[in-house]
């Protein structure tokens, strides 16, 4: 059976949180499930790459690092707690080998509580460009036609074949350039602006957004610490789930000038 293709993004300060997510991913998979890991590299240091490699080596996996042409993102505004790396997921179809027909993108501010095979083998994807979970956000920058719902980009089940055929990355980047007033929630607004009628909804358990779904009675498979408040810089719902894996992760912070800050970093999500 072919491995499940997982894609994630990290800069150097977020690498420890990516490692925590990947640790939970592998700790909770079923015995017969295999994952192939691609990491879009936002200037991760050699030291932290070695730690990521060592972590995945324990599961007999070697991550593949992908480099982005940053000139493509000159019109992508990074502000607040999110950095420009968040936009890099737009280029996933172009970064992965052409033989890979679909991919599962995961944000790094997540904990994976179960196996992802059920999500991966969802047959609906062949009819759409994307499977995603609705984001019950109160407001967004992008203006969708009446009747259409807004999706969260933390978990994206991507039909790469259709994305490439229709050159979706170029269309999303063009949307950003031509509609700057509609970009409030970064690439998420742009992806919704282009794909609002080309995606199908996944069950909330696949992207349980703690900031907006804590009131729902759901047993989540993927816990998503969305918004600027993360387990490592504030108090969040299900914070203990993050620290259960973070506390078991072997991760060495290199000493630097000034006070040592282990959990303080600017988020890419």
Image (spheres, grey):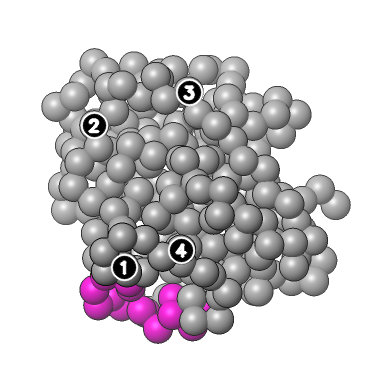
Image x and y of residue 15, in percent? 48, 56
In the picture of the structure, the residue carrying the numbered disc 4 is 254
| Helix, strand or loop at mark 3 | loop
Q: Label 4, label 3: how many angstroms apart (C-alpha)?
A: 28 Å
| Callout 1–callout 4 Cβ contact below 8 Å | no
Of badges 3 and 1, the one in the foreground is: 1
Question: Circles 4 and 3: CB distance less than 8 Å?
Answer: no
CA gap, disc 2 and disc 4: 30 Å
Q: Which residue is mark 2?
A: 77
Question: From the viewer's perspective, is the residue at label 3 or at label 2 nearer?
Answer: 3
Comparing labels 2 and 1, the label whose residue is closer to the camera: 1
| Circle 2 residues within 10 Å: few <14, some 14–19, many ≥20 | some
* Of 174 and 10, the residue lying toward us: 10
Report the magenta residues as a range.
230-245
Where does the image place residue 176, in percent across and percent down from the top left?
28, 23
Q: Is the Cβ of the residue at disc 3 closer than 8 Å to that at disc 2?
A: no
Q: Residues within 10 Å of mark 4 (few under 14, many from 20)?
A: few
Which of 5/161 is in front? 5
- For the point 32% across and 53% down, the residue is 267
The image quadrant of residue 95 is: top right
Residue at 65%, 38% in the rendered image? 102
Q: How many marks?
A: 4
**Precedes in sequence: disc 4 or disc 3:** 3
Q: Which residue is mark 3?
A: 69
> Who comes first in sequence, dot 2 or dot 4?
2
- The earlier-in-sequence mark between 3 and 2 is 3
Among the 4 quarters of the image, the one containing residue 213: bottom left
């Amino acid at each position: 059976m072919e491995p499940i293709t997982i894609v994630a993004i990290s800069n150097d300060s977020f690498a420890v949180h990516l490692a925590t997510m990947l640790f939970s991913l592998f700790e909770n998979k079923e015995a017969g499930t295999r994952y192939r890991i691609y990491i879009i590299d936002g200037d991760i240091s050699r030291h932290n790459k070695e730690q990521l490699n060592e972590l995945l080596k324990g599961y007999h996996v070697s991550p593949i690092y992908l480099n982005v042409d940053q000139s493509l993102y000159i019109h992508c505004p990074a502000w607040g707690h999110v950095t420009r790396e968040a936009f890099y997921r737009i280029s996933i179809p172009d970064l992965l080998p052409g033989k890979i027909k679909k991919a599962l993108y995961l944000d790094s501010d997540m904990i994976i509580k179960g196996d992802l095979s059920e999500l991966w083998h969802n047959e609906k994807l062949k009819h759409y460009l994307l499977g995603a979970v609705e984001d019950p956000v109160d407001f967004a920058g992008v203006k969708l036609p009446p009747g259409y719902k807004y999706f969260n980009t933390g978990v994206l089940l991507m039909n790469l074949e259709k994305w490439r055929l229709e050159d979706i990355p170029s269309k999303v980047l063009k949307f950003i350039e031509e509609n700057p007033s509609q970009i409030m929630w970064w690439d998420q607004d742009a992806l919704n602006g282009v794909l609002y009628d080309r995606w199908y909804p996944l069950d909330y358990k696949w992207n349980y957004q703690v900031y907006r779904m804590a009131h729902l009675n759901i047993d989540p498979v993927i816990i998503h610490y969305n918004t600027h408040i993360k387990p490592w810089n504030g108090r969040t719902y299900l914070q203990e789930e993050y620290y259960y894996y973070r506390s078991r992760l072997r991760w060495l912070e290199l000493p630097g000038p000034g006070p040592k800050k282990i959990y303080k970093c600017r988020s890419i999500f």
